[in-house]
Image: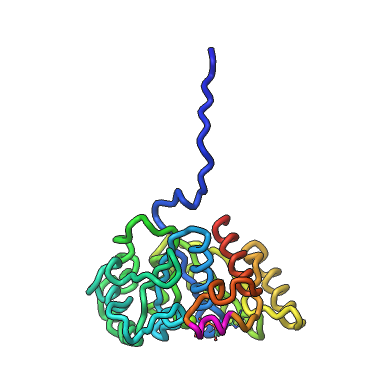
Amino acid sequence: MTRHVVEFPQVDPNLLISSPRIVAVANQKGGVGKTTTVMNLGAALAERGAHVLIIDLDPQSNSTSGLGIDPSRARLTVYHLLAGEAGIDEVATPTAVPRLHLVPSQVALAGAEIELVGQEEREGRLRRALTALDGGFGYVLIDCPPSLGLLTLNALAAADQVLIPLQAEYFALEGLAHLLYTIQLVRMNLNPRLELAGILVTQFDARTTLAWDVLNEVRRAYPDKLYQTLIPRNVRISEASSHGQPVIVYDPTCRGAQAFRQLAEEVMNR
Ligand SMILES: Nc1ncnc2c1ncn2[C@@H]1O[C@H](COP(=O)(O)OP(=O)(O)OP(=O)(O)O)[C@@H](O)[C@H]1O
Ligand SMILES: [Mg+2]
């Protein structure tokens, strides 16, 4: 009897994802690189062919302006999404980067946190809104504010994974245990499928012994959770944001751009 061997063509596994991978980028510590990671990882994933949606869940609106969109001119924002006044299709808008879309934020979002307090299912607003997302997106990246308040809880309740940026600086690990404990509580009470995607060391300056000390400390404490990619301290990264562009667009060959491309590859293969 002859056996027929059926050969399937090789397909990029990322193109088979029918529901998006939802990643919350969170750390209650301010200025550690959450927004920078969301914008630039999002752009690098889009460059590799993925359809990416960034949700700016921070009233500071840094990822909105960092992607060249004026928050004060955005008509429908994540505020309207959380309030149930608009659907995800209405609030998501294209950016200048092909395949990269954004749900903008505005400062009024700060009020939403207070308005939500008395309401039912206040932690599940974003999750509910995202169920209406069509299958077109491969990744949803959520830029969280620097707190563990209701907005971050909405992100953690909606996400499949958390990515934690950690600045290679003094007190880097301070607060990390509290964040991991919060993730544990969210898993038990709101979202059992939430997992830790990884810890990303940011603003790494290889010339300082402090940066290496911090890196070694994180490696020791969380050996299998650390991304291999280190994001270097690179002035082109912050210049790019101030020009409303991801660094891979602003300066495609600089060290910062290369690092975010490498991170995108690591995220896609994990
Ligand atoms: N790798 C880097 N090299 C140089 N500058 C960087 C780098 N990463 C971030 N920055 C700069 O550091 C500042 C803080 O970064 P970012 O806004 O991404 O942090 P954040 O965690 O989102 O802050 P917040 O908690 O206020 O939301 C910004 O001015 C940004 O441009
Ligand atoms: Mg930010």
Q: Residue at left 77%, top 82%?
A: 209
Q: Quadrant of the C terminus?
A: bottom right
The residue depicted at 37 percent of the width and 57 percent of the height is 136
The way the protein has been coloured in the rendering is rainbow
* Residue 85 appears left or right of 133: left
Q: Quadrant of residue 85?
A: bottom left
Taking the spot 50% from the left edge, 35% from the top edge, the residue there is: 8
Magenta-drawn stretch contains 211: no
Residue 148 visible from this viewpoint? no
Residue 242 seen from this side: yes
User: x%, y% of residue 95?
Assistant: 40, 72
Q: Is residue 242 covered in magenta?
A: yes
Return the residue nearer the eye: 33 or 192.
33
Percent x, y of residue 139: 45, 61
Q: Is residue 156 left or right of residue 267?
A: left
- The secondary structure making up most of the magenta span is helix
Q: Residue furthest top?
A: 1
Toward the viewer: 58 or 219?
Answer: 58
Q: Which residues are magenta?
A: 237-243
